[in-house]
Amino acid sequence: MDPQTLTELLDVTVLDRLDRIEDLPADELARSAALRKESYSAEVTAALLTQARLRKDAETKLGPFAAEMLFTRDGLAQATRLPVAAHHARRLLGEGGDGSAAMTIADLGCGIGADAFAFAGMGAEVTAVDADEVTAAIASYNLRHLSNARVEHARAEDIDVSGFDALWFDPARRQIGRGTKQGSTARITDPEEFSPALSWVIDQALAAKAAGVKLGPALDHGLVPDEAEAQWVSHGGEVVEVCLYFGAARQRPGRSALIMGERTLLVHEDNLPDEDEPGIGELGEYLLEPDGAIVRAGLVTALCPPLQARRVHPKIAYLTTDVAPTGPAAAGVTTYQISEVLPAKIPSLRKELVARGIGSVVIKKRGADIVPDQVRRQLKLPKGEQATLVFTRVGERHVVLLTQPVDSANEETNP
């Protein structure tokens, strides 16, 4: 969105029309025609339709607050989910300072303002900064009801951060114009091309009283400073970020994984066993798929002792056990009951599946060089029951495990 279109969108009558857009036909072509009939320009009409779509998309991240917010596509893509933003705020305000309402936080790279919303909502005085003019204006709109939050259009590198109690960084990891179409965006993989560069961010974080840095979950472990706590986070079964915490916001150094959702689990590298678990490669009754945050953090074996489990292969992030998972650690895995071990060659596999009346398969893989959609097409199964196929290695064998997911809601979750 260009600044001129945003200026027109921020007109009170246009915003009112956005709030009432559901009064128009649901079909976008009909809705567009109705808006043009009401004398809205082509640019404003397109902006209204886009904002209506983005508000709906944002509900999964921001809940009911999305209905009163504005977005850019990239801003929403990088925006923090509200429960995760609340976790960030607790880390910075609870452990990162004295917890008082007077605590000051600089949110450097605030995007559309989701984290600043949480910081200010929990009582901090927030200065939110973004280098993009349109994004900064949208953040200002989204934070309009919070008198203890203000937004600046500026580069993070140009802000004097010395007077803040805590710093929060969310470097931009997408760049406009780097995609295949004009105006499209592409992910940036080189941390020194982030905006601001990761090395500059870490220098500021190391010097701060307390700091947090939100990054993509694929971050190389080698980029984590010894002074930081690196916490990978999944929410609702999806790995959403890794955060580096510094100073008073750091609870303890090293790697951790936080699983958020119906059940919560925190796993730290202190939980890693001193020795390899016995029986690696011996298949049990259940297959356990660790949460992606635990896998990204390199903490899979921390689940072995509490779940009485072992790896199917030393380098593959699947566990197996003879005991149905219970207790808090069960929140860290998805459980499948293993029915049989089937042949990996497609013709033989198809024959075995058809003989068992299986016509629909969910395909998972680790340690197997396959493309699930391609395998599904090659199987050409007739209609039948559904099952989950897991292509992996057990010891040195390439196998296909015929499994059924176990409903965790019916499992005991307390020790």
Image (cartoon, helix red, strand yellow):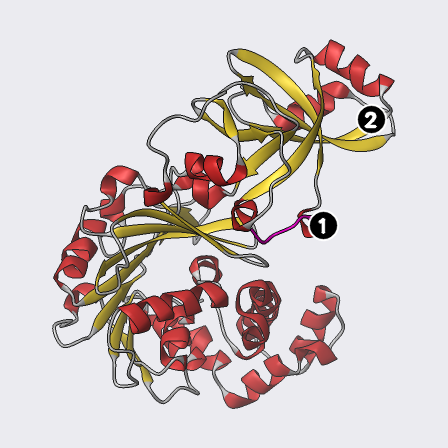
Give the alpha-carbon distance from disc 2 to disc 1, as whole Å.
25 Å
Q: Which residue is mark 1?
A: 410
Q: Circle 2 — which element?
A: strand
Residue range of the region highlighted in magenta in the rendering: 411-415
Please provide percent x and percent y for residue 10. 47, 82
Please provide percent x and percent y for residue 7. 43, 80
Q: Residue at x 18, y 75 (%)?
A: 164
Q: Amino acid at mark 1?
A: Asn
Which image quarter is the N terminus in? bottom left
* Precedes in sequence: disc 2 or disc 1: 2
Q: Circle 1 — which element?
A: helix
Viewed as shown, does residue 250 lie left or right of 407?
A: left
Q: Residue at x 61, y 66 (%)?
A: 53
For the residues carrying marks 2 and 1, which lies nearer the camera in this image? Answer: 1
Say whether residue 39 is visible. Answer: no
Q: Amino acid at mark 2?
A: Ile
Say whether residue 224 is visible. Answer: yes
Please provide percent x and percent y for residue 327. 56, 49
Question: Quick check: marks 2 and 1 in contact, CB under 8 Å?
Answer: no
Tell whether position 148 is magenta.
no
- Look at the picture and state if 130 lies above or below 352: below
Q: Nearer the viewer, residue 395 or 197?
A: 395
Secondary structure mostly seen in the magenta stretch: loop
Tell whether position 413 is magenta.
yes
Q: How dense is the environment of label 2, judged by Cα within 10 Å: few (below 14), some, or many (20 and up)?
A: some
Q: Which residue is mark 2?
A: 358
Please provide percent x and percent y for residue 368. 54, 20
